[in-house]
Amino acid sequence: MADKVLNQHEKRFLVGPRSRWKELMYAIDIFREFIKGFRVLHFVGPCVTVFGSARFDENNEYYQQARELAAGISNLGFTIMTGGGPGIMEAANRGAKDAGGASVACNIVLPHEQNSNPYLDRYVTIKYFFVRKTLLIKYSYAFVICPGGYGTLDEFFEALTLIQTGKIEKFPIVVFGSQFYEGIEQHIGMMIKEKTISPQDKDLLLVTDSIEEAIYHIRSKIYMNFGIRLRARPILGEKEFSFSK
C-alpha cells in the first residue's frame, strides 16, 4: 500500500507545477534520499556497476555469464554494485561473493516491491529512480551493461551521455552480449553516419562476449589510463580514491 501511495506521489509531481510549499517538501524529501544514500555507500570503495534485467533466473545463460564476469572484476579489487534486485543484479552480487569480494546495491521502491537479493554486504533502498541512478553512477569507476530491458538501456545511455559530455571521467563501459545488443550497435553506426554523434564516440564502449576481454578492458582503462590512488584521511577515518593521469 505504501509503495502505491509513493507511486501516486511521483505521478502528481511529474504532471507539472504545484504549490511552492509542496515543491519545497518534495525537494527536501529528495535531499533526504541523497543523504541516506551517501551514509550507506560512502565507505564502499571504488565500484564497478553491473546493469541488467531482473527477469533472468539462475539457469539462464546471461545470469551465469554475469556471475562469472562479476567474480573476475571483483578479483581486480573492485566492489561490485548493482540495483540490488533479482536476475542479472543478483548474479553480479553473487559473483562478487563467490570471489570473496565486496557486494553492494542501491535498490528501488516499486509498486510491486523489488526485494533485495541475498548476496549483499550493504544496500540502500531509494524512493526515486533519478536519485538511485545518480548514486549508481557516483560510486562507479566502470559500467557493465548486460542483457536487459528499458531500465538497463536507460542506465546505459545515462552513463554514456555523461561520459560523452564530460560530466564524468571516461570510465570504461562494457556492453556484454553482442548478439543481444546487435541492434544497438547498428543504431550507433547509423547515428555516426547521420552525424548525430562523432565517430570517436563509438570508442566510449566495448561490445564483447568474452569475459576475459571485458576484465582486461576494465583493468587497462582504470589501472593504466587513470591510475587509482588511495589517499587516507585519518582525521575523518575515511578513504578517498582519486586519479593520477
Image: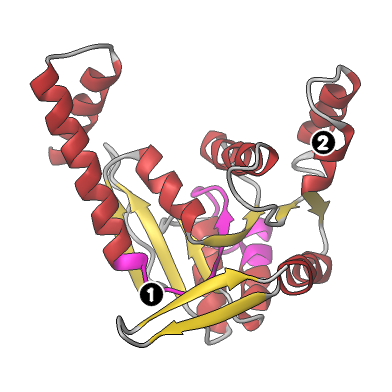
Q: CA distance from mark 2 to mark 1?
A: 36 Å
Name the disc covering residue 185, or none: 2
Q: Is residue 131 left or right of residue 6?
A: right
The image quadrant of residue 37 is bottom left
Q: Residues within 10 Å of mark 1 (few under 14, many from 20)?
A: few
Q: Is residue 99 or residue 173 the one in the foreground?
A: 173
Instruction: Decide if residue 209 is on the left or right side of residue 21.
Output: right
Is 136 contained in the magenta span?
Answer: no
Tag 1 secondary structure: loop
Is residue 6 shown above or below 132?
above
Relative image position of residue 95 (x, y in whole percent)? 57, 74
Type of amino acid at the residue the image marks with label 1: Phe
Sequence order check, earlier mark of 2 and 1:
1
Q: What's the magenta region?
A: 40-66
Tell which residue pokes out farthest to the left in this image.
Answer: 21
Disc 2 marks a residue whose amino acid type is: Glu
Residue 99 drawn at (x, y percent): 58, 84
Residue lying at 38% horizontally and 74% vertically, measured from the top left: 43
Q: How many marks?
A: 2
Is the residue under label 1 in contact with that under label 2 (CB below 8 Å)? no
In which quadrant will I find the N terminus? top left
